[in-house]
Image: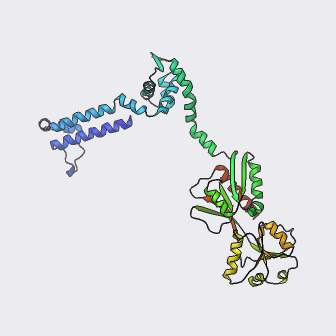
Amino acid sequence: MLENNRTAAAISESVVFAIALATGSYSGATGNSEKNFGSVLRNGSFLASLITLRGLLTYLIVAILIIDEINNPRMQAFRYKQNRLQQLRGFCAVVETGSVSKAAIRLNLTQPTVSLQVQSLERDLRAILLERRGPRIEVTFEGELLYELARPLVEGLTALDQNFEDRRNNVEQGRLAIAAGESTIHYVLPRTVQRFSSAHPGIALALNNVTGQQGLQQLRDRLVDFCVGPILDTPADLMFDPVVAFDPVLITSLGHPLSKLGKVSLRDISRYPLILPPRHLSTWRQVEMVFQQHRLPYEVRLEMGGWEVIKRYVELGLGISIVMNVCLTGRERLEVISVKKYFPKRVYGIVQLKGRALSPQARDFIATFKETLSASA
């Protein structure tokens, strides 16, 4: 209704402007542009000018017709037909309150608006839904049938926003899928998973043991919510949130000649055969990069997956290895030598797909992950 009044007012102002312009009573150039319709009518030249301005009279008639059409209930009824929810909401409110006026108060609408909603619904359905007997309203058979069908729909849609908000912020149920490498699952995530599972027993947690590239592909395919682990180069479609860093160490068997040196150089390390993870993993790439930068030769005697396996074979004296200190418990029969002077730290963090919103479960897991690692730092 407010929009209709504004439109009618705008048309009326246009009419006044046209009359003023035609009669010479408009003097916007001199700043006197606030003359109203009454001042134009009081102008003595108005009637004489209007007689010679048939076009202006036509304009007035058309404007009046437009204003009349805007306020025509049939025009408004056509607009209400486009919104079935509003029709049904008004109808159900009338049935439940037994009064159009009470329904209008409940819906915070005017009484004519609610009446128009019901009337347009009756026309659309070609049925009489309510019978008006003076101040009383009786629901017809068709009205009762429609109310039975419409009530759960209206209630559901009315509560949709709140239900959506509740579900969106519900962290107690659902499923969370995470992609991570074997070392991440084995050494970095256990305490976080334990805390998260204890706090949210209703959430099904899946840890996909994959390589780095496999994890990124699962993330792009939306098979997982996010990845946890190190990443050397972050692709443009992903973002990396670093959380914790671990130092590289050289491990040898007990009594190894390197353990007897006061200071171990990279050249010293290059003299002994290495045991490394498969070459498609990041550890191999980092070790290779360091030796190539220093133009030193190196030999990989054994290639095997998993730091636990590598530690076992190093204990047997089959080679030396470069690992991250996170994999050491202190119970191994190994010599441990710091090599952070030569090899970079391994930064672990969260890898996410840009533009993808995280679920409440995912956000809570990440928060738990950061808190757990922060407490143990």
Q: Is residue 269 above or below residue 187?
A: below
Position of 135 with respect to 291 (left or right) is: left
Position of 2 with respect to 35 (left or right) is: right
Position of 351 with respect to 249 (left or right) is: left
Which image quadrant is residue 17 in?
Answer: top left
Position of 171 with respect to 14 (left or right) is: right
Q: Is residue 36 visible?
A: no
Instruction: Point out residue 230 in the picture as x, y percentages from the top left corner.
Output: 68, 66
Q: Quadrant of the N terminus?
A: top left
Instruction: Point out residue 74 in the picture as x, y percentages from the top left corner.
Output: 36, 28
Instruction: Point out residue 30 in the picture as x, y percentages from the top left corner.
Output: 20, 51
Q: Nearer the viewer, residue 167 or 35?
A: 167
Q: Is residue 130 above or below residue 70?
A: above
Residue lying at 31% horizontally and 36% vertically, measured from the top left? 8
Report the coloring of the rendering. Answer: rainbow
Residue lying at 75% horizontally and 46% vertically, measured from the top left? 201
Which image quadrant is residue 325 in?
Answer: bottom right
Which image quadrant is residue 322 in?
Answer: bottom right
Q: Nearer the viewer, residue 44 or 264?
A: 264
